[in-house]
Image (cartoon, rainbow, N blue to C red):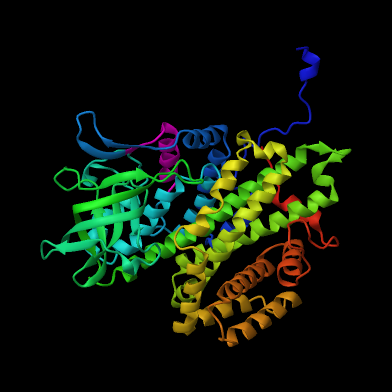
Amino acid sequence: MAATTHTVTNQVPPLVGYDVFAADRALSEAVERHIEPGVLPVAREELSRLGQSAGSAQAQEWGAQANEHPPVLRTHDRYGNRIDEVEFHPAWHRLLGHAVAAGLTDAWGRPAGHVRRAAGFLVWTQAEAGHGCPLSMTHAAVPALRTDPLLAAEWEPLLTSYVYEEGLRTPTRKAGVLFGMGMTEKQGGTDVRSNTTRAEPVSGDGEYLLTGHKWFCSAPMSDGFLVLAQAPGGLTCFLVPRVLPDGTRNVFAIQRLKDKLGNRSNASGEVEFDGTWARRVGEEGRGVRTIIEMVAATRLDCVVGSAALMRQAVAQAIHHSTHRSAFGGLLIDKPLMRNVLADLALESEAATVLAMRLASAYDTDTEEERAFLRIAVPAAKYWVTKRCTPVVGEALECLGGNGYVEESGMPRLLREAPLNSIWEGSGNVQALDVLRALQREPQALDAFLREVGKARGADHRLDAAIKDLLTELADLEGIEARARRLVERMALVLQGSLLVRWAPPEVSDAFCASRLGGDWGTAFGTLPHSLDLASVVARARPVAD
């Protein structure tokens, strides 16, 4: 073939070699806003280091390798002994090691810990999302374990360690551990109170033997797990270690790994317990109450993780459009493409601002903020995770056929996009959780309304949306059937309030006009043409070094 027929032109350079944190104005501004001045310089430096790593060619290669070589289950060794181990590609371990060293399992014991960790999680997830599961579970196990001071003293230093050690050994011989979680069973799914796994006490010191199964066990290669089982006093939370204090393996039979749509680098398994040793966490019969703080923390990570996927997808779309020419000019300068990109950028920024506001509430930890989180977390989990898939799909389309091939990385983002809406309670579960808070905890609604009310009077469309929301909240007839509609409006009003207070005028104006004012179509790229869309796109552009 003649060389002249194979000249490559008008192809977009890879988005690589840039600081993922510094290039994200919405995120970096949120960090500035929510971290006190005395801690900010250290936080900014650590996030920038992580951002440079996330934007490096090396991290991007690790992400590709971890997904091209998914985990493999080894139930037995060569001699027939049951080992139940999961093997991962070295790239997976490198990603996890870097994440743990960056403090992504340590939020509970350092200044502004939740904002710093959430920002880091949002940054590093853009390199590869699958390994975020064990990071999230490990981080979220801390509040559940704190219901038992002895267990917390034993495990918390290992859970919040900055050292990652792969392999199963006695926990006291490791510098750091990972945790997973097992609640879902075949017959009940989300209805965990129908669980059939039995827990029989064997001593008065909180030791039990478990018999049963878990249909979905997150991160089955971990060092320990929080699980639910039926004790004599009712549904109870337990800690199941993989390796017992004497160094022998606990009974933990991994029957198979799930063959999932996305999240390919991460292992999710089905496990059986047969006389499996466990320690009780909290009181008998209060398993849901004990584990609920873990669930709330992982739900926040679903919001942060979805914001990360959206940000990476939008960054790729804007980067592509900045370098790709068509019909006599760059795509980014075409009015219709600019409308699409601006619309996507609005969704991404709204998700980021909301995720970081929730993280800051964890750091503040007042009665008011805890009440606010009671409604805001499930509402955000419902809405932000649902917006992820259409955002990533539209961003992929911005790359055209180039975005549809695996080498672009966009198909992996698209396969990952639905996950956070399903895990830790799907959409209906979140909507019903908001209804429970509305009906049983009036202080939660009061805190939510005070939060959105902080922007009242700044935008007439937001004011009108708040008024309409109050009208809808006052009408309880048929409330369950319209729970999704109500929670969607709550999430949009909250996002609008945050953007009006903190985002540039061109961003808040476009959001309120479209999402709250109704001047919007049913697909992305249908914003009012009179808005300052160029500024919205320029703000979201990832600028490589």
What main secondary structure does the magenta stretch of the protein show?
helix
Residue 246 visible (yes or no) = yes
Residue 59, percent across and down?
52, 36
Residue 346, percent across and down?
69, 59
Residue 340, percent across and down?
76, 53
State which quadrant residue 506 falls in.
bottom right
Residue 101 is inside the magenta segment:
yes
Which of 58/516 is in front?
Answer: 516
Which of 307/21 is in front?
Answer: 307
Which of 11/176 is in front?
Answer: 11
Residue 194 in the figure: left or right of residue 45: left
Residue 471 in the figure: left or right of residue 224: right
Q: Residue furthest front?
A: 187
Which of 351/199 is in front?
Answer: 199
Q: Residue furthest left?
A: 203
Q: Residue furthest right?
A: 328
Query: In the rendered image of this protein, does residue 477 appear above or below residue 289?
Result: below
Rendered-image quadrant of the N terminus: top right
Which residues lie in the magenta part?
86-103
State which quadrant residue 479 falls in.
bottom right
Number of numbered labels in the structure image: 0
Query: In the rendered image of this protein, does residue 166 appear above or below residue 505?
Result: above
